[in-house]
Amino acid sequence: MIEQEEEPSPNTPKPSDLDTSNISTDFPEELDPFQRLLQGLKNSPRSPKVQTEAMAEDKKPSGSKPRKEEPIAEEAVIGSAMPVQVVSAVKEVKAALPRAFTGVRKDAKKFLREVLIYVALNPKAFPDDRSKKLFLLSYMTDGPGEFWKNEKTDLLLAYDADAEKVTWSEFLDDFRTSFEPLDPALKAQMELKDLRMKERADEYTYQFTYLAKQTGYNDAAQIVAFKRGPLKSLAFKIMTRPEGAPTTIKEWMDAAILFDESYKQAMEYGKTWDDEHGGKKPQRSFRKKEDVAIKQIVEID
């Protein structure tokens, strides 16, 4: 039995009518630019990151150059570190400069101490022994040490080989031999003998301790020397205290400072008391007492 083929109905659309994609591809001018971009992205096999970069490149104006990446972080680290290193390399401690030395022997030790303090606080300013020597010589002015200074300075400025071999320690020993007293102990003993207390016991004690260390005196000899310095009233106060006179130099110094400070505090309190109670204390009438005594004698007679 032969089946009869069905004829297509006149109302059924043809396959050619249903294929709209062929129409859009055959006539691309019918799509707007945005739809063309979406169509191209859908058909492109590239990754989303590449697609995004491509979109960004499409938006750039023609003729623009690609931006070159710069190592910002590395430059920032170097730029911030370098100035700090430069400042720390040249920074010095603001210490007091040594006072000029005129060659007087009694000032030699003080001058040398000031030089050593400044050099110790600024080691980067004096990298070698030569700079230290010239620094010391630069503060020696006209006086007994002028010839010594000129000789040393000329040799150092001429880069004399023998002068360069002299170490900083040897140079200081040469200075001490040339300018400091020949017998420091005897000099300290003479100064200690003339030392007297002026206004405060603590100042006198500090000066006494500094000189006593150079004299070589034992404890008993220091006590004898110490008792010559304070005021007479203060020395008597220490010797007649209730617990007895001190037996060591440290006890003498502590007692002198204690009694002196107590006396000054009492005097200060007395001034405050006078101000709070109307000024000066009323003076006693010795004339009145004398009249009373005479009257009593007359009555007895």
Image (cartoon, grey):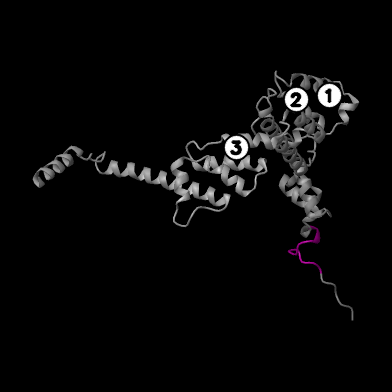
- Disc 2 from disc 1: Cα separation: 10 Å
Residue 62 falls in image quadrant: top right
Residue 95 in the image, given as x and y percentages of width and height: 65, 34
Residue 136 is left or right of residue 251, and the answer is right
Q: Amino acid at mark 3?
A: Leu
Query: Is residue 166 a member of the stretch shown in magenta?
Result: no
Residue 201 is left or right of residue 101, and the answer is left
Residue for point 45% across, 53% down:
241
Q: Earlier in the sequence, mark 2 or mark 3?
A: 2
Q: Amino acid at mark 2?
A: Leu
Q: Secondary structure at mark 1?
A: helix
Number of residues whose C-alpha sits closer than 10 Å to that of mark 2, classed few (under 14), some (14–19) or many (20 or more)? some
Q: Secondary structure at mark 2?
A: helix
- Disc 2 from disc 3: Cα separation: 31 Å
Nearest the eye: 63 or 19: 63
Q: Looking at the figure, which quarter contains the C terminus?
A: top left
Q: Which residue is mark 1?
A: 156
Q: Which residue is mark 2?
A: 137
Q: Looking at the figure, which quarter contains the N terminus?
A: bottom right
Q: Which residue is mark 3?
A: 192
Q: Which residues are magenta?
A: 7-16
Residue 55 in the image, given as x and y percentages of width and height: 76, 46
Q: Relative to 114, is 217 above or below?
A: below
Dots 2 and 1: beta carbons under 8 Å?
yes
Nearest to the eye among marks 3 and 1: give it: 3
Residue 86 in the image, given as x and y percentages of width and height: 74, 35
Q: Amino acid at mark 1?
A: Leu
* Dominant SS type (magenta): loop
Q: Earlier in the sequence, mark 2 or mark 1?
A: 2
